[in-house]
Image: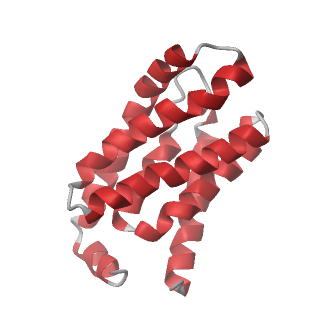
């Protein structure tokens, strides 16, 4: 069931994703795509309802700042949903928030070059390697963020409201 609290948190996280991407766009769309905004994907570990909003945040950001058209927008939407969906699945399996590092690195690294390679005329595997390097920083930041949030008593109370 959708609640006002979930909608509010979702809207704030989507807005935060867009603002962070705007502020870091100079490194978010380069050869290594160090997309600090994707560290927010890890929040789905604490807030499973963020799966669709994270896809929406990526779609809007690619529309506003990406410049590669509908394929990049829809691809980013799908990558956001897939990545956060895997993170939610990891939580359901009882895995630590540290495991969120893996999908934040590897889902974008393996999926984004599927459309960037033909759009940019670059080979797939070098793009994969560049994205693995670029996504490592946001992946670690995201896991640190979630570990810090879930260890706070006020956050634990909020998380309990969503179970």
| Vertical placement of residue 136 versus 4, above or below | above
| Vertical placement of residue 108 versus 132, above or below | below
Q: Could one spot residue 27 in this view of the protein?
A: no
Q: Position of residue 75 (x, y in %)?
A: 64, 42
Q: Identify the residue at horizontal 26%, vertical 58% (top origin).
A: 148
Q: Identify the residue at horizontal 37%, vertical 32% (top origin).
A: 136
Q: Identify the residue at horizontal 50%, vertical 86% (top origin).
A: 1
* Residue nearest the observer in this picture, 153 or 52: 52
Q: Position of residue 156 (x, y in %)?
A: 26, 75
Q: Could one spot residue 58 in this view of the protein?
A: yes
Q: Identify the residue at horizontal 49%, vertical 45% (top origin).
A: 38
Horizontal relation, residue 157 to residue 72: left or right? left
Which image quadrant: the C terminus? bottom left
Which colour assignment does the render follow? secondary structure
Q: Position of residue 94 (x, y in %)?
A: 20, 62
| Vertical placement of residue 63 versus 7, above or below | above
Q: Position of residue 70 (x, y in %)?
A: 78, 42
Residue 4 is drawn in which quadrant?
bottom right
Number of marks drawn: 0
* Residue nearest the observer in this picture, 70 or 37: 70
């Amino acid at each position: 069931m959708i609640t006002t609290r979930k909608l509010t948190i979702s809207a704030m996280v989507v807005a935060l994703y867009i603002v962070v991407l705007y502020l870091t766009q100079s490194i978010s769309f380069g050869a290594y795509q160090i997309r600090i905004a994707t560290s927010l994907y890890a929040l789905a570990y604490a807030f499973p309802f963020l799966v669709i909003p994270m896809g929406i945040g990526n779609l809007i950001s690619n529309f506003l700042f990406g410049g590669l058209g509908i394929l990049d927008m829809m691809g980013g939407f799908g990558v956001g949903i897939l990545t956060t969906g895997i993170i939610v699945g990891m939580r359901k399996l009882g895995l630590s928030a540290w495991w969120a590092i893996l999908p934040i690195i590897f889902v974008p690294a393996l999926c984004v070059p599927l459309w960037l390679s033909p759009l940019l005329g670059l080979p797939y595997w070098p793009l994969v390697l560049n994205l693995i390097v670029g996504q490592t920083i946001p992946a670690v930041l995201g896991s640190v963020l979630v570990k810090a949030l879930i260890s706070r008593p006020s956050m634990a109370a909020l998380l309990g409201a969503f179970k």
